[in-house]
Amino acid sequence: MNNGVLIGAGILITIAGLIWALQGFGVVGGSFMSGDSVWAIIGPLVALAGLSITGLGLWRRRAPSR
């Protein structure tokens, strides 16, 4: 997979996870997720997965090619 695609997808997944977490914690309202503790758990996990994907894309970009 292209490194740029990994980085872009990772950033989008991280943003989605952060929004879900904020909704779960009740910081952002206006959704069925607002104030729901399930999303307060799922959101940070998704954000961490997004950061991992972004890190993978950055690491592969800097790794010496053979």
Image (spheres, rainbow, N blue to C red):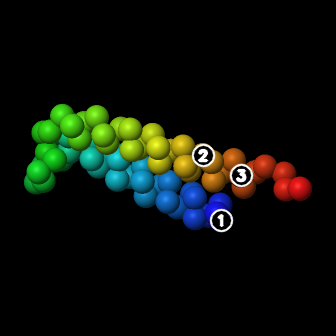
Residue at the right extreme, as displayed: 66
Q: CA distance from mark 2 to mark 1?
A: 13 Å
Image-quadrant location for residue 2: bottom right
Q: Name the kind of residue labelled 3 in the image.
A: Arg
Residue 20 spot, x, y in % from top left: 27, 47
Left or right of residue 64: residue 24? left
Q: Residues within 10 Å of mark 3 (few under 14, many from 20)?
A: some
The residue depicted at 34 percent of the width and 45 percent of the height is 18
Is there CB contact under 8 Å for labels 1 and 3? Answer: no
Residue 39 spot, x, y in % from top left: 23, 41
- Disc 1 on helix, strand or loop? loop
Q: Which residue is mark 2?
A: 55
Q: Name the kind of residue labelled 2 in the image.
A: Gly
- Mark in the foreground, 2 or 1: 1
The residue depicted at 14 percent of the width and 45 percent of the height is 34
The residue depicted at 42 percent of the width and 49 percent of the height is 14
The residue depicted at 18 percent of the width and 34 percent of the height is 37
Q: Which residue is mark 1?
A: 2
Residue 66 spot, x, y in % from top left: 89, 56
Sequence-earlier tag: 1 or 3? 1
- Disc 3 on helix, strand or loop? helix
Q: CA distance from mark 1 to mark 3?
A: 9 Å
- Disc 2 on helix, strand or loop? helix
**From the viewer's perspective, is residue 38 above or below residue 10?**
above
Q: Name the kind of residue labelled 1 in the image.
A: Asn
Residue 50: give its label.
none
Residue 60: give its label.
3
